[in-house]
Every structure is written in C-alpha cells, then in structure tokens.
C-alpha cells in the first residue's frame, strides 16, 4: 500500500469520498513510484493547482478516458454514466480522450448534453480528441 499521508490533498479527497486513493493520486499527477515517505510536494503549489482561487474549495478534477480506463471505443450511455459518476461534486472537469478511437452518439449525448444539462455548474472541457471524437462531441453540443 502506498502511503498517502505525505500527500495531503490526496488524503483529503480520499477521506471525503470524492475519489479513490488511485484516482486522487492521478489527479495530482502523483504516481505510485513517486509517492514515497519523505517526498512531500510543496503544499502551496498543490493547493494553487487544484483549488478555486475565489472559494478556496477543492473542486477540479481531470477525468481520464482512455484504453487503460474504459476502452478505445466508447459507445453506450451506460459507459458514459460510469464516466460521469461523482463528477457533479466538481465545477471543472477535463475529459481526456487520449487513446480513444471512437465514441458513439449515445455516449457523447449522455455526457455533453444530458449530464451537462443536469449539472449546469459543471464545466466539461474535452481534450486530446481525434477528428472522429471531436466531430461527435461538436455534434451533440450543437456546435
């Protein structure tokens, strides 16, 4: 088990139930290899990176959607609901499509229309999209 006490934001997010230990470490860019006792990151830098400067609340996350997580073809609404589970707790979500080759209309519609309409305070920012994925995201967003 990797000690998380040396990473205060990882521990805080994990204790609040917002994310699992592995997810919290990924959010902070901390790998299991670097999460060692004695390697304490500068807290001010971590807080500046992951908190809203106006409210000082921990509310940003980077959701990674790629082969290691969900697959290279994401087609169904049920897959999208698994991706969005818990994201309503944050205000800004980066949806990283690196490694995803194809997305279905239902998948994109569930995230970028249904979820977005149900959670208007959550900003969804898709990144690392190939041409096919970008087309489908634009289509469901009505752009």
Image: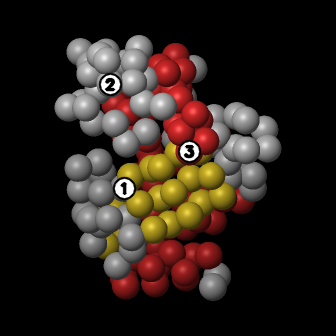
User: For the residue labelled by badge 1, is the local secondary structure a helix, a strand or a loop?
Assistant: loop
The answer to whether one can see residue 75 in this image is no
Verify CB contact (< 8 Å) between mark 3 and mark 1.
no
Location of the N terminus by quadrant is top left
Which of the numbered marks, if any, corresponds to residue 65? 1
User: For the residue labelled by badge 2, is the local secondary structure a helix, a strand or a loop?
Assistant: loop
The residue at the far right in this view is 54
| In the displayed structure image, the side of residue 91 where residue 66 appears, left or right | left
| In the displayed structure image, the side of residue 68 where residue 8 appears, left or right | right
* Of residues 62 and 70, the one drawn nearer to the viewer in this rendering: 62
* Distance from Cα at disc 2 to Cα at disc 3: 18 Å
* Distance from Cα at disc 3 to Cα at disc 1: 21 Å
| In the displayed structure image, the side of residue 4 where residue 2 appears, left or right | left
The residue at the far left in this view is 33
Give the mark nearer the N terminus: 3 vs 1. 3
* Of residues 46 and 26, the one drawn nearer to the viewer in this rendering: 46
The residue lying at 54 percent from left, 21 percent from top is 12
Q: Mark 3 points at which residue?
A: 49
Which tag is nearer the camera, tag 2 or tag 3?
A: 2
Q: What is the crowding at mark 2: few (fewer than 14 residues within 10 Å), some, or many (at least 20)?
A: few
Residue 79 against residue 50 in the figure, above or below: below
Q: What is the crowding at mark 3: few (fewer than 14 residues within 10 Å), some, or many (at least 20)?
A: few
Query: Residue 20 appears in which quarter of the rendering?
Result: top left
Query: Residue 44 appears in which quarter of the rendering?
Result: top right
Residue 107 against residue 63 in the figure, above or below: below
- Residue 135, percent across and down? 46, 84
- Residue 79, percent across and down? 40, 52
Give the mark nearer the N terminus: 1 vs 2. 2
């Amino acid at each position: 088990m990797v000690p998380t006490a040396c990473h205060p934001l990882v521990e805080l997010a994990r204790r609040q139930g917002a994310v699992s230990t592995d997810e919290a470490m990924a959010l902070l860019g901390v790998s299991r290899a670097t999460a060692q006792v004695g390697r304490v990151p500068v807290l001010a830098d971590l807080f500046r990176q992951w908190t809203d400067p106006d409210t000082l609340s921990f509310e940003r996350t980077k959701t990674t959607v790629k082969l290691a997580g969900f697959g290279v073809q994401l087609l169904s609404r049920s897959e999208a609901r698994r991706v969005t589970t818990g994201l309503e707790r944050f205000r800004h979500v980066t949806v990283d499509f690196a490694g995803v080759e194809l997305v279905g209309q239902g998948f994109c519609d569930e995230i970028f229309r249904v979820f977005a309409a149900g959670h208007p305070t959550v900003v969804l920012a898709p990144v690392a999209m190939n041409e096919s994925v970008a087309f489908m995201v634009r289509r469901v967003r009505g752009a």
